[in-house]
Image (tube, rainbow, N blue to C red):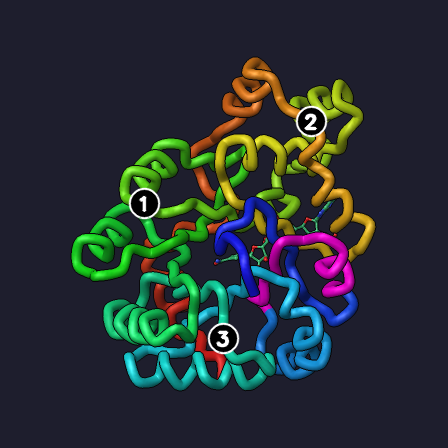
Amino acid sequence: MTGDPCPSLVQQVGQPGEVVVAERGADGLDAGEVLDVRLVACREVVRPVAAQLSVLLLWVQDAPAQENAKRAFERSLDRLGLDYLDLYLMHQPYGDVYGQWRAMEDLHRAGHIKAIGVSNFYPDRLVDLVENSETTPAVNQVETHPFFQRADYQSLMSERGVQIESWGPLAEGRNNIFSDPTLSAIGEGHGKSVAQMALRWLVQRGVVVIPKSVRPERMAENLDVFDFELTDEEMSRIAAMDTGVSVAFDHRDPEWVTRIGGVRID
Ligand SMILES: NC(=O)c1ccc[n+]([C@@H]2O[C@H](COP(=O)([O-])OP(=O)(O)OC[C@H]3O[C@@H](n4cnc5c(N)ncnc54)[C@H](OP(=O)(O)O)[C@@H]3O)[C@@H](O)[C@H]2O)c1
């Protein structure tokens, strides 16, 4: 596998058939939610196309300690039938974060992973990790979309050498995004869809996006955002949609820390 570990658009794989679209042109494969059963199901499909993909994201949430993190990594590789990953992310800033990170650094140094990163780290946790580690996370994957834009945080990440990557770039379909009047009106002017407006706006801001769809026609649509540009005025109109609030939940909420932090992927 070759190429930049941070392409600007990565397709989600959720079912074997979806990888076909990745073959056609996506820069990468996000296996973030391809949990055990689906990993096994995907294995034979992932293996032949993996050589064409430049990114693979996996969670280490099931790995609360350093030794377990390495075991989880090896198990994931085995399930995917691959011998190394381009990008490996820590899912949450919960549990033994430093134990997990040291394990990921070791795997990175040993050449088993090309780049390592984190997800759902808020500014305080990210800066603390950067300040106390040899390796700066290549990526921080956080909720980012027109309703929750995180421009200041993007600047901070950039200063610290961390690439922002958006999960939920289409706001997971919430807030009626697909009938949003601002995105619809701007899209009409370009002959593009609302989804394409949201994705183009993020890409143009320098945000890596990983839209998810189970429908091949939508995957193709979501990739088709590189043949036009939004004007400064259009960028500003979308910037004005920011509510500054997550449409999902706050990862610092104690209830969620217990709920998500307690999930184990066997
Ligand atoms: N790091 C984390 O904690 C975290 C958290 C959540 C999600 N993620 C990752 O982020 C990625 C995407 O996020 P997400 O799935 O939460 O949300 P998303 O990509 O913002 O939205 C997905 C939703 O939009 C629909 N959709 C996709 N393309 C569309 C289009 N062109 N037109 C109309 N509807 C469209 C999908 O429906 P159909 O599938 O029916 O097309 C689905 O309902 C996934 O890879 C996921 O694994 C990471």
> Which residue is painted at 43% across and 70% down in the image?
113
Range drawn in magenta: 18-33
The disc labelled 1 sits on which kind of residue?
A: Gly
Of label 2 and label 1, which has the lower sequence position? 1
* Residue 192 coordinates in the image, percent (x, y): 76, 30
The disc labelled 2 sits on which kind of residue?
A: Phe
Q: Mark 3 highlights which residue?
A: 84
The disc labelled 3 sits on which kind of residue?
A: Tyr
CB of mark 3 within 8 Å of CB of mark 2?
no
* Residue 30 coordinates in the image, percent (x, y): 58, 62
Residue farthest to the right, as pictured? 217
Q: Residues within 10 Å of mark 1 (few under 14, many from 20)?
A: some
Q: Secondary structure at mark 2?
A: loop
CB of mark 2 within 8 Å of CB of mark 1?
no
Q: Nearer the viewer, mark 3 or mark 2?
A: 3
Q: Quadrant of the N terminus?
A: bottom right
Residue 227 highlighted magenta (yes or no): no
Q: Is residue 26 above or below residue 108?
A: above
In depth, the one of 75 and 244 nearer the eye is 75
Q: Is residue 173 above or below residue 54?
A: above
